[in-house]
Amino acid sequence: MSAVGSPSLGNLALSRKEDWKAFAETPRRIQPEQLTRRQVKALGAEARVERDRLLRVWHANLGPIKTPQLAELHDDLWDIVDSNVQDGDKAKGAVAVDAFPGLGKTTSVLAFLGEFHRREIAEQGAFTEAGHERLPVCRVGLTGNTGMKDLNRSLLEFFGHPGRNRGTTAQFGQRALDCVVSCEVRLLALDDLHFLKWNQKNGIEVSNHLKWLANEFPVTLVMIGVGLADKGLFSEGDTRRDTALAQTGRRTTRLDMRPFTIKSEVDRREWRQMLLALEQRVVLADKHPGMLADDLSDYLFARSTGHIGSLMTLINRGCQRAVRSGAERLNRDLLDGVKNDEASEAARKELEAAQEKRQLTSRPRSQRRPAA
């Protein structure tokens, strides 16, 4: 069990400040020792149980991998956040990370938020000049059909405010503002923004509330969601409703994340480099150089369709089976028995058919094997 005041990273709710701090400030896990098969067989019963436990946790938390997509997103976020140091009388630009599921947007943004938290604490200290706990980041995850009052209450839940259970929407908002100012929050992250009640009737209400947050809270608003453009976040038009939405759009920079593709040589090299980085993190007794990047490159692309979320799920589940079964390696036979998300499975047959006809490959030219 974890010591009191040090929650397990597997038992965190990032919408609470204590858990957010644990996520952001806990040192990175140490990679388990790479043992040979002979060394694994020589382990005693207790040591084997402990190794299995360590590998379960390790393989379930292989990411984030610093892919080109993650690096591009982080560069853009640093540009925006570091330029948002205007005085409090000026509204700060907002960010919307709007991308399809499975591309790693939440994982990538959380990694950035953690970096920002650590930088601010290192530079400014753990407490403000007034003696309040410094919380550079406030992160709130939204749920299905969330309204404005629910959003304000969620902000208060993050801070553990005693007034989070009673009050009006406006009162909740003012209490949240007091917390943000007192704790010197600089980034307010709203995850799963698409869950907000966002339709024809109350689209203006949503937009106006986001505008109020951006205007009154001395923070950079970081919104994360799916299909935000389709919901009208960036709309601009001639009607009164469109004008209200357009003001939010004018202050918001839209960022996205692209999937891996294999259309060009550059694309294929990016895919290979990512597999090589991932391969280094896998801890299996019979792992060998090229296990992923050479032996399984096309197969893994077909199984994931270039979506890193689907790839990480497949590798995690494959490693769990490899350790549990004693196979201690990843190959096609083992992974064929591992289920992946439905979207990837649905697209798999078409990609595999193209690969079999040699119409498509994920391997750079320098890594291709000559035809038999």
Image (cartoon, grey):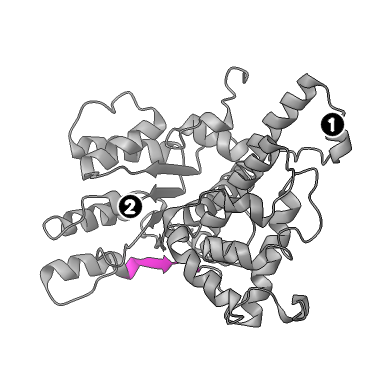
What residue is at 63 percent from the left and 40 percent from the top? 320
Type of amino acid under label 2: Leu
365 to 179, vertically: above or below: below
Question: Are there few (<14), some (14-19), or many (20+) residues within 10 Å of tag 1?
Answer: few
230 to 64, vertically: above or below: below
Which numbered disc covers residue 193? Answer: 2
Q: Position of residue 369 (x, y in %)?
A: 77, 76
What residue is at 58 percent from the left and 65 percent from the top? 301
Q: Position of residue 170 (x, y in %)?
A: 20, 40
Q: Is residue 63 left or right of residue 170?
A: right
Q: Is residue 69 left or right of residue 157?
A: right
38 to 88, vertically: above or below: above
The front one of 256 and 207 is: 256
Q: Position of residue 152 (x, y in %)?
A: 28, 40
Which quarter of the figure is the C terminus placed in?
Answer: bottom right
Q: Answer whether residue 255 is magenta in the image.
A: yes
What residue is at 59 percent from the left and 75 percent from the top? 355
Task: Name which quarter of the figure residue 204 lies in.
Answer: bottom left
Give the label, 2 or 1, closer to the camera.
1
The front one of 337 and 162 is: 337
Task: Name which quarter of the figure residue 211 lies in.
Answer: bottom left
Q: Which residue is disc 1 drawn over?
A: 41
Which numbered disc covers residue 353? Answer: none
**Visible residue check, residue 78:** no
Task: Name which quarter of the figure residue 185 lies in.
Answer: top left
Type of amino acid under label 1: Lys
107 to 76, vertically: above or below: above
**Visible residue check, residue 72:** yes
Which type of secondary structure does the marked residue at label 2 adopt? helix
Magenta stretch? 250-258
The front one of 27 and 364 is: 364
Which type of secondary structure does the marked residue at label 1 adopt? helix
